[in-house]
Structures are given as structure tokens and as C-alpha cells.
Image (cartoon, grey):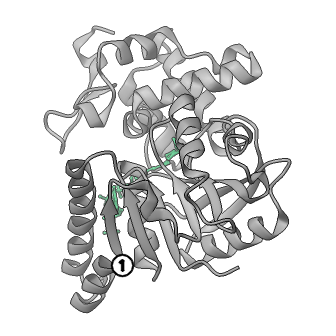
Amino acid sequence: MEIHQVGIIGCGQMGSGIAQVVAFHGYQAIVIEATEDLCQRGIRGIHQRLDKLEQKGSISGDQNAAIKNRLRASTDLSQLSACDLVIDAIIENREAKLHLWKSLDPILKRDAILASNTSSLSITEMMMATSRPARFLGLHFFNPVPVMTLVEIVRTIATSPEVIQTAADFVGRLGKTPVFTSDRAGFIVNRILIPYLLDSIRILENGTGTISDIDRAMKLGCSHPMGPFALADFIGLDTTAAIAEILFEEFREPRFAPPGLLKRLVTAGRLGRKSGKGFYDYSDPASPKPMDESGRI
Ligand code: 3HC
């Protein structure tokens, strides 16, 4: 099966990144957002990133214009009726996703491939909200999407091999590398990454190290591009806590339970970079200050 037109629902951090990469690699991309304002904001963000690529000389002016031409936004789900592949990148909320897939089922063409970019919710449950389980799978991109080269391809008990192959070819055409995983909470990356982030918070809480020292240790000791606190802030502390809850619910192992400090930060609205404060204070983005410098955790 050939993919020409791709629908992306949700134009936030992940959805806009996916739309950018899809249009960049020659596909027609339609993004769906809840309001006109959100459509415009999403498209504006993508245009700004494309303009930066042009300024850096990574793409020509003509290429920039052609990519922008392949991108459009709408608030109307019925605009997805001609899409060969539809990717959900809406909020990580089970009810919202199930509702979305129920609404999309009568709209999408019968041989479309249906994919969710969920980081940890059950693909099997979403596929059961549609009338075509064999055509449903997970396509899990990583943040920032234009930079990160991995996509997890999540198969369920029902996904057809043809759909998995078509998805793998598509991922390759986006210049990314697929890995294949079964539908278990967290798939491969978050199943390993989230307990690592939670352990970092636990050793901060028990006084083993400071935020700066733990981050420095993992950057310099393991060559990670970011330490665990910078990374948790980058992912979003609400997202990190929500994935932890889903992992804990599925596996019932204490290592997946979100630590008290993480829950308190989320309750206090300190969600990481996106809210300006998390484990670090981003008032001066060029030089974020760790919260334990103040002695109050
Ligand atoms: N969108 C597009 N491009 C971006 C970007 C963004 N949001 N942020 C950075 N970039 C690009 C820059 O333009 C730059 O490109 P260039 O080399 O062509 O000039 C390149 O990335 C490097 O950026 P910077 O020099 O500004 O900064 P760094 O060298 O510090 O890199 C980083 C930034 C790429 C974010 C790097 O720190 C990194 O790789 N961090 C780890 C990210 C990570 O682990 N992501 C996975 C999170 S887990 C996840 O997504 C799963 C989910 O389910 C939770």
C-alpha cells in the first residue's frame, strides 16, 4: 500500500513535529486541532522552524515553500477522509483517545492505516474503539521529533503484517529508524527510561546527590545528552508522572510508582520547561537554576 496523504490529530509539541517531518519528506500533511487559534499556532511554530532551517542553509527557499505548501490545518475531522495514514498525537488521556478513535472510525477510508503516537496507553484498547483492528498500530515518535531518529512500531495481537511493513517503510522514508515492540505499557523506551527518571528523583530525595551533580554525573559518566532532571523537565513532569502511573497500573511494581516530590511538583503547576519551572527554573533560559540551590525541595 502507498502512503501519500497523512493526517495528524493534535498540533502540540509531538503533533507539530510529526507534521513537519512528514511534509518535509514529501507527503501531504493535514493537521487537526480543536480551534482555529490552535491550528494557527501549530502551523506558525512549524513555519518558524522551517525558516530557521532555511536561514542555516539546510534547505533552500524553494524547498521551504514546497514543504509549507504540503501542510494544512483544519478543525474538521472529516478533512481526514482521504488520508492513507492517520496518526493521533492528542493529549495522553485514555477517554479522549477512545472518543477520538470512535469518532474517526466512520470518517476514515476503509484501507487507511490508523496509528497512535501514545507513549504508554494501550494500543489494543484504542484499536477496539474502531471496526478495523488489523489496520491499527502504535507509531511512537520521540521529542524533538525533527531531531530524534527513533520510532517505535507497536504491534497488537491483531495488527496485520502488511500494515507493519507499510509503517516501517514509511518510517524509513522519514529518515528514521523503526524498532518493533509489542503492546505493553511504555513499550521499550519508556519502560526503561521512566524508572530511571523516577530513581533519579528518589536518590535526590534521599540526599545521595544534588540536581546539578546527578545531571552532571549522567551526562559525563554515561554520555547522555541531558541529565535525568533536565530530561524530565524537557518531557514535562506531568507527562512523566502520567506515564509512571500507567506503568504502575499495568505492572504493580514499586519502581514504577511516581515519587512524592514528582507528584507535588505537578500539583504545584511546576511542569518543567513548558511552565517555566520544574526541577530547574527557566526564568533565564540560557542558564536554568536547579530548585535545590534554594534548599527547599
Ligand atoms: N525542534 C526541532 N529541532 C530542534 C529542537 C526542537 N524542539 N531542539 C533542538 N533542535 C535542533 C537544533 O536546531 C540543532 O540543530 P542543528 O544541529 O542542525 O543546528 C540540534 O537540534 C541541536 O540543538 P541545540 O544545539 O540547540 O541543543 P543541544 O545540542 O543541547 O540538543 C537536544 C538539544 C536535541 C534536545 C538534546 O539535548 C537531546 O538529544 N536531548 C535528549 C532528548 C531526548 O532524550 N528525547 C527523548 C525524550 S523521551 C520521549 O520523547 C518519549 C515520550 O514518550 C516521553
Quarter that holds the N terminus: bottom right
Query: Compared to 179, does 241 lie above or below?
Result: above
Q: Position of residue 144 (x, y in %)?
A: 41, 55
32, 42: nearer the viewer: 32
Q: Is residue 216 visible?
A: no
- Residue shown at 45% from the left, 51% from the top: 143
Question: Going by the image, does 117 lie left or right of 159?
Answer: left
Q: What is the secondary structure assignment of the residue under circle 1? A: loop
Q: What type is the residue that disc 1 sits on? A: Arg
Mark 1, Cα crowd under 10 Å, few <14 / some 14-19 / many 20+, is: some
Question: Image quarter for residue 290?
Answer: top left
Which image quadrant is residue 108 in?
A: bottom right
Q: Position of residue 23 (x, y in %)?
A: 41, 75
Q: From the image, tell me which residue sits under label 1.
A: 70
Q: Position of residue 72 (x, y in %)?
A: 32, 69
Q: Quadrant of ligand 1?
A: bottom left
Frontmost residue, 76 versus 24: 76
Residue 255 placement (x, y as % from top left): 67, 19
As drawn, the residue found furthest toward the front would be 106
Q: Is residue 141 above or below residue 206?
A: below
For the C terminus, the image quarter is top left
Q: Which of the 4 image quadrants contains residue 86?
A: bottom right
Residue located 60% across and 37% down the image: 193
Q: Residue at x 59, y 71 (%)?
A: 84
Above or below for 167 versus 246: below
Q: Which residue is located at x 21 percent, y 34 percent? A: 282
Is 40 placed left or right of 226 in the picture?
left
